[in-house]
Image (cartoon, helix red, strand yellow):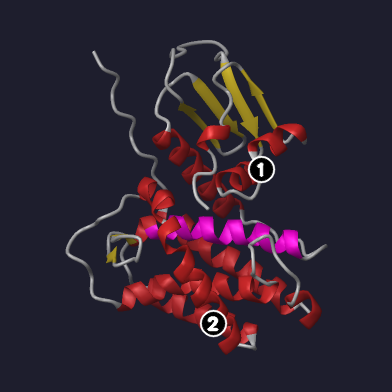
Amino acid sequence: MSPAKKRARTYDPGKIRTAVLTQFGNVRQAVRTLTDEQLALPTRLAGWTVRDLAAHVTMAVETVSRNLDRDEPAKAELTLLQWPFATAARAGDIADGTRDLAAANPDLDALYARTEERLRQRLADAPGDRLLAARTGAMTLADYLVTRTVELVVHTDDLNAAVPGLGIPHDRQALAACTRLLADALAAKAPGGSTEVRIPPYAVVQCVEGPRHTRGTPPNVVETDPLTWIRLATGRMGWRESLAEAKVSASGERADLGGLLPLMG
């Protein structure tokens, strides 16, 4: 008998909405403090300054409001687990749009204020099952908001890496949702039960074809912290680099995830 299909992870819609608003607020507070010199610093995204990246965070959130303004599509086209693999095709358009937005909005705090106000207004009466015509593919508002935690957490980390001492905090719910979605995406990309990937305290997934363990300690184990995992999954850190810096522990012949990462760029 084949094993039962694993049930998709669910997320608390209220907590996710709060997480998106909280993390956006965290970034806004930090961006307010940046000097012109800091805004001109390079980031680990090639060709992007801190100003570009700060503007992009508003773009990532504004897509929620903009898609709620559009007509509702007839049917969903994308599941939550498909989203990480559907983003690469949009990278060029996003880069161009980001630079245009940054150039057109020298007052970043005003841009953040408008974006936040619109988001709060549009979410006030929008049901989670409302379909959005997102450019990656139509999906429910509830699922789309989970993808926004990925955008916000990843770019919070990018900003912290670019500006020494910035220290933007990560909302716990946003960090948890981002970690879990990217862990589940790995399990979807490499289905199986031979390797256990542990990202305490938020996620444990089974992946990679091979002998399935049923009890006791699995023969192949990978363990890391949430931010290292997110950097690996999004190409901010390489697999060999993470091992060399002891950011990841990996034991067993099927514990090498280098060929499966990154999941999204």
- Residue 89: x %, y % from top left: 41, 59
Left or right, residue 208 beside residue 107: left
| Foreground label between 1 and 2 | 2
Q: Amino acid at mark 2?
A: Leu
Q: How much space separates mark 1 and mark 2, taking CA atoms?
A: 30 Å
Q: Is residue 184 above or below residue 223?
A: below
The answer to whether residue 14 is visible is no
**Mark 2 neighbour class, 10 Å CA radius: few under 14, some 14 to 19, many 20 or more:** some
Q: Is residue 123 magenta?
A: no
At 72% across and 36% down in the image, what residue appears? 247
At 65% across and 67% down in the image, what residue appears? 26
Of 135 and 184, nearer the camera is: 135
Q: Is residue 146 magenta?
A: yes
Q: Which residue is mark 1?
A: 228
- Residue 239: x %, y % from top left: 64, 36
Element class at badge 1: helix
